[in-house]
Each structure stands twice: as C-alpha cells, then as structure tokens.
Image (spheres, helix red, strand yellow):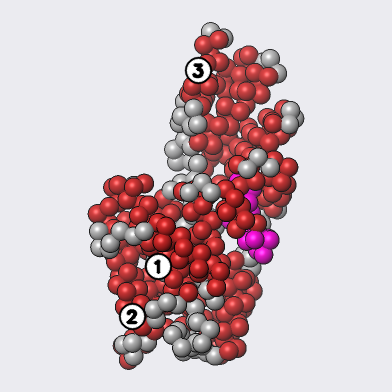
Amino acid sequence: MRNFRTQIGKILLLISLFVMGINSAKSQWYIMETRADSLVQVGIDAIYNINFSLCEKVYKQVQKEYPGNLAGYFLEATSDWWKVQLNTRSTANDKQFLKSINKVIDKAQQELDTANYSLGAIFFKAAAIGYRGRFYTIREQWVNAAIDGQEAYKLLTRGLVLAPGNRDMLFGIGYYNYFSKVIPDEMPLLKPLLSFAPIGDKVLGIKQLKASAESALYADVEAKIVLLQIFYQFEKDWDNALAIAQKLASKYPDNPFFQKYLGRLYYVKGNFSAAEKVWYKLLVSGSKKTYGYDDLLAREAMYYYGDILMSRGNFDRAIKYLTASSKMSNKVDKQASGFISMSHLKLGMIYEQKGNVSKAKEHYKKVLESPNFQNSHEKAKDYLKKHK
C-alpha cells in the first residue's frame, strides 16, 4: 500500500545525514568545535523526535556562535525537510525548505571557492543537493531530481578520495549500492535517469548500511531508517525490520514515522495485541492534532485498528473505524488505493457475518470499483455470485 515513489528520491540522495560524520580519530572528516558538535547532536535528536522548537533554538545558537560552521545551516535545512516529509501532500513548507537547503549549498560553494579540497564543504554541499533532489522526486520534478542526483554523485566520488572507509560516509555508499540495483527493476522507466552511475550490489549495500547503523557517529539513525524500509518493503525480513522499529520507536516515541512502522510490523507478524496499542496511540495523537499526524496516517491507523477489532469479533466498533478509513481514502487519494479496496472488503465480510446481505453486497460492489488488492476482486465476486 505504501507509495514506492517516496523511495525513488533516496537513490538520488546518496549521502543524507552521514555527511556530518567524523571518525573516532577526527582525522578524515569535518572537524567541528566540541561544543558545536554536542549542540548539533542535540539538534539531530530533536528532529527525529519531532521537537522542531528545540531544534530551532539549537541551530540558531550554532549559527550565531559558529557562523563558519556549515553544520548549523544543514541542521536548519534538515529540520525543514522533515516538516515536508511528515506531510508530503502539503506544500506549505516547500518554500522554506528550498530557501534553507539552497543556503547550505551556497555557503558550501563559497568555502570550496577558497578551499577546493575542504572535505566538510564537499559533503555538506552534496548532502544538501541530495535532499533537494529527493524533494524534487516528491513533487515529481524528475529532470531536476536527476540533475541533482548526478551532481551529488560526482561530489560523493570526489569526497571518497579524501575520506575512504569513514563509517558515516559508508551510509551513502551502502544506500547507493542497494537502491541502484533495486530501482531499475521496480521502475524500468527511470533507468535513463540512473544511467550516470554504475549498478550497485544489494548484498554489499545491506552490509555497508549495517556497518553504518552500528558505528557511524551521526548517520547511525538514518542508516537504521533505511534498513527498516529495506527489510520491510523489499526484503520482507519482518524479524530484522521489527527489531529496528522497536529501537527507533522507543528512542523517539513522538515520531509518527517510526510508530507507523512498528504498528505495521506487529500486524504482519500477527501480534495483534501489540499492534492494537500502537495504532490506537496513533489515533489518539492524531485526534489531538499532534504535529506529523496527517490524514494519510489517520487513514492507515483507522484501517488497521478496525481490522484488528474485526478479528476479535467486535464488529460494531470495527465498522466505525473501517468506514472512517474508507471515507478518508476518498479524501486523500488522487487515485483509489489498496486501503479503500480492503476497507470495503472487510466491511463486506463483517456484514456477511452479521447476515446483512444487502449491506454486504453494497460494500463488495465498491470493492470491484476499487483496485484489485490482495485478491480483493476475487473474494468480492465469489460472494456476489452466491447472492445474485
């Protein structure tokens, strides 16, 4: 049900947060003042826990006290990026994101104009261009995304000469190795846009991402996020995905992105009791208008919560949530999605169990008007044949 398009942008990103990393000896990376480094760490954690007010205080302080340090400006842009990512249907944060990300690019280029081999400037510029490229994929501006992807790749290869083996940098290499192999298979039409770089290696990519997740200084969380998505969506490795989701959701309990994956994985693993708690928590947070809990997440939470209620025989409450999910799908989907198909299928099954043939037929007919998801059409047709 998850839109694969959001994954396309990450191949163009290549290097994301790893660019801020330094190794234990601080000899291969962008050397920051100890205090600035500590502040940036606080800011990064604030972003992941969706505490944007705290992050704003941090990046303003870093920018004021260390105006020559690119990390403060990159932190601001990353904060703006998460505001876009948490609600991709809204364009309210687009202008501010582009302003802050272009500021990083400009400042990095100014440094490169005077110090051509500045590792920090190379990587901050590459990271900023990568985020911008990812933004363009969300807005389906594919040419701009491809241009940014090519430039980010060139900067990455340039930086590798200066800092080989860096675990934070390994995040970007692993990401590239995995998705450059996956994307052409999943979306052949994008092959021309990826022709600027060689095809990677999935197995190697996962190993590199694991290494980054285990010991990168700054990119460990981002590497975990990538592995979570890989294991959940592409590899179907529920056990590894769940282990990562549990860690992220525990460390950053206010981030709906992590909670969502935790709820999905409990569900696919058949742990409905744990899944119910997660989805109910998301519904409560959404009802309070907590930042990041948009209509797309509400639709998903209502579906899973309603489906779990149905599995327990709590039909009346299940009807309430599944109906709400189908209505939300009509509101948020440009084209009918798997959620609306499955919501009507489940509603048809409930009314079938209740012996209400007319209501069951009503929902099964709506299933046939929606995409065929997980054999939903076949199931609906079987019932309708029996009750002509």
Q: Is residue 167 positioned above or below 257 on the image?
A: below
> How far apart are the two marked residues, 2 and 1, measured between alpha carbons?
13 Å
First in sequence: mark 2 or mark 3? 2
First in sequence: mark 2 or mark 1? 2
Instruction: Check disc 1 and report its element: helix, strand or loop.
Output: helix
Magenta span covers which residues?
247-264
Q: In the depicted view, which residue is nearer to us: 204 or 276?
A: 204
Crowding around mark 1 (Cα neighbors within 10 Å: few <14, some 14 to 19, many 20+) is many
Does the segment drawn in magenta span residue 257? yes
Q: Nearer the viewer, mark 2 or mark 3?
A: 2
The percent position of residue 40, horizontal first and vertical second, equals 57, 79
The percent position of residue 297, horizontal first and vertical second, equals 59, 48
> How far apart are the two marked residues, 2 and 3, measured between alpha carbons?
60 Å
The percent position of residue 317, horizontal first and vertical second, equals 73, 32
Crowding around mark 3 (Cα neighbors within 10 Å: few <14, some 14 to 19, many 20+) is some
| Amino acid marked by disc 3 | Lys
Which residue sits at x=47%, y=35%? Answer: 336
Q: In the depicted view, which residue is nearer to us: 153 or 205?
A: 205
Q: Main secondary structure of the magenta part?
A: helix
| Amino acid marked by disc 2 | Val
Crowding around mark 2 (Cα neighbors within 10 Å: few <14, some 14 to 19, many 20+) is few
Whether pointer 2 and pointer 1 mark residues with C-beta atoms closer than 8 Å, the reply is: no
Residue behind mark 2: 161
Residue behind mark 3: 381
